[in-house]
């Protein structure tokens, strides 16, 4: 069975964007692949190093969100990044094989750098793709499911692996070069139309939100601003609500767009329908969520068990890596 590596940074609860973009895919993939889920608490530090208490709380939040949507602890290996020493060691070794310049030109890093400015960008943040290369390879992952926007990170990781093998492998493959498994699901935008979603922006529906939260949030979603009256024809292409119908309510999406264009549905009814669909989707997740919240020691055991297994695999990898690099006694 091929192995996949996927996961989340532990920087807060997961929202519908995470579900539509990757969690629902994860649930399907767990039956076909040996699924490794990383709770990336070290990578969370790249942007949240001043808030370690949030990262710690988020380990449980992210783990419970993953389990609540249907990931089966008997099918997957869920582990904590900071518990896997091979990831830390590989990150250091790989960091010798990549130039600062190529990291600066990584499109994802470039975008973030625009936000923070290069002068304030930490060494750890710049090295994010290096640390991702370590995540992907410590456990011999065959595939890494990613959205289009994550491709540059994966590519940079693959380059590092190729360089490592050609430098130290003497014709042998020491670390496996993973492939990207691209998800074509369009990225879900915030309810306010913002490309980014998050707690500070107040524009996301969380998987653990109550039905009332969902209703309130959907009511506030931005629609086609030029549609003043119910008799005006709308444009679903510029409406946030329609994007959510597309992601959550696929079967009715085309019909809703047509009704909107012909002024056969009002925005209030359209939003009510969306709230219903979201609540229907979230209802079983909420039940599991309550269960795991009440049984946090179970969640802890799942993570610790997974980390033990991941460490066993990682220790073998690091043994081979050190031998190949001639740094062993
Ligand atoms: Fe958006 Fe629905 Fe209103 Fe059309 S009817 S503008 S899709 S909320």
Image (tube, grey):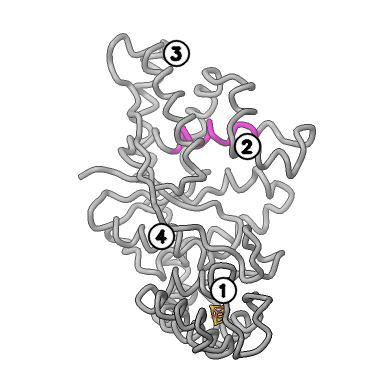
Marks 1 and 3, the one that precedes in the sequence: 1
| Residue 128 sits inside the magenta stretch | yes
Looking at the image, which residue is at 39% across and 40% down?
Answer: 311
Which label lies toward us, 4 or 2? 2
Q: Which residue lies under the disc numbered 3? A: 327
Q: Tell me, yes or no, whether the two marked residues, 1 and 2, touch with CB atoms within 8 Å.
A: no
Disc 4 and disc 2: Cα gap in Å?
35 Å
Which label lies toward us, 1 or 4? 1
Residue 57 in the figure: left or right of residue 253: right
Looking at the rendered structure, which numbered label has been put on residue 109? 2
Marks 3 and 2, the one that precedes in the sequence: 2
The quadrant of the rendered image in which ligand 1 is seen is: bottom right
Q: Which residue lies under the disc numbered 1? A: 235
**Residue in the foreground of this view, choosing between 151 and 320:** 151
Secondary element under disc 4, as helix, strand or loop, is helix
Which label lies toward us, 3 or 2? 2
Tell me the magenta residue range. Answer: 124-135
Marks 1 and 2, the one that precedes in the sequence: 2
Looking at the image, which residue is at 66% across and 70% down?
Answer: 192
Q: Where 166 sits versus 309, above or below?
A: above
Looking at the image, which residue is at 74% across and 44% down?
Answer: 115
**Residue in the foreground of this view, choosing between 300 and 136:** 136
Looking at the image, which residue is at 42% across and 18% down?
Answer: 164
Q: Where 145 sits versus 285, above or below?
A: above
Specify the quadrant of the image occupied by residue 46. top right
Which label lies toward us, 1 or 3? 1
Q: Is residue 276 visible?
A: yes
């Amino acid at each position: 069975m091929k192995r996949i590596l996927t996961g989340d940074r532990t920087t807060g609860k997961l929202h519908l964007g995470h579900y539509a973009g990757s969690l629902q895919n994860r649930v399907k993939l767990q039956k076909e692949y040996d699924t490794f889920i990383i709770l990336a608490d070290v990578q969370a530090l790249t942007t949240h190093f001043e808030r370690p208490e949030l990262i710690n709380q988020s380990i449980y939040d992210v783990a419970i969100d993953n389990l609540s949507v249907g990931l089966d602890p008997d099918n997957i290996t869920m582990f904590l990044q900071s518990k896997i020493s091979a990831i830390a060691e590989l990150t250091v070794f790989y960091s010798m094989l990549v130039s600062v310049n190529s990291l600066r030109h990584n499109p994802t890093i470039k975008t973030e750098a625009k936000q923070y400015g290069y002068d304030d960008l930490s060494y750890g943040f710049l090295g994010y793709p290096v640390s991702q290369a370590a995540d992907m390879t410590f456990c011999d992952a065959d595939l890494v499911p990613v959205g289009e926007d994550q491709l540059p990170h994966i590519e940079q990781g693959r380059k590092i692996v190729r360089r490592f093998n050609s430098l130290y492998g003497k014709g042998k493959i020491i670390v496996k070069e993973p492939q990207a498994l691209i998800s074509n699901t369009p990225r879900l935008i915030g309810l306010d139309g913002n490309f980014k979603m998050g707690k500070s922006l107040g524009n996301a529906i969380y998987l653990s939100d109550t039905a009332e939260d969902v209703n309130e949030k959907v009511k506030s979603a931005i629609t086609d601003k030029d549609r003043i009256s119910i008799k005006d024809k709308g444009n679903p292409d510029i409406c946030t609500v329609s994007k959510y119908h597309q992601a959550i309510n696929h079967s009715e999406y085309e019909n809703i767009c047509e009704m909107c264009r012909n002024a056969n549905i009002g925005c209030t009814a359209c939003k009510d329908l969306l709230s219903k669909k979201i609540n229907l989707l979230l209802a079983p997740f909420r039940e599991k969520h309550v269960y795991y919240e009440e049984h946090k020691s179970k969640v802890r055991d799942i993570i610790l068990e997974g980390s033990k297994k991941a460490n066993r695999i990682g220790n073998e990898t690091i043994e081979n890596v050190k031998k190949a690099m001639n740094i062993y006694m």
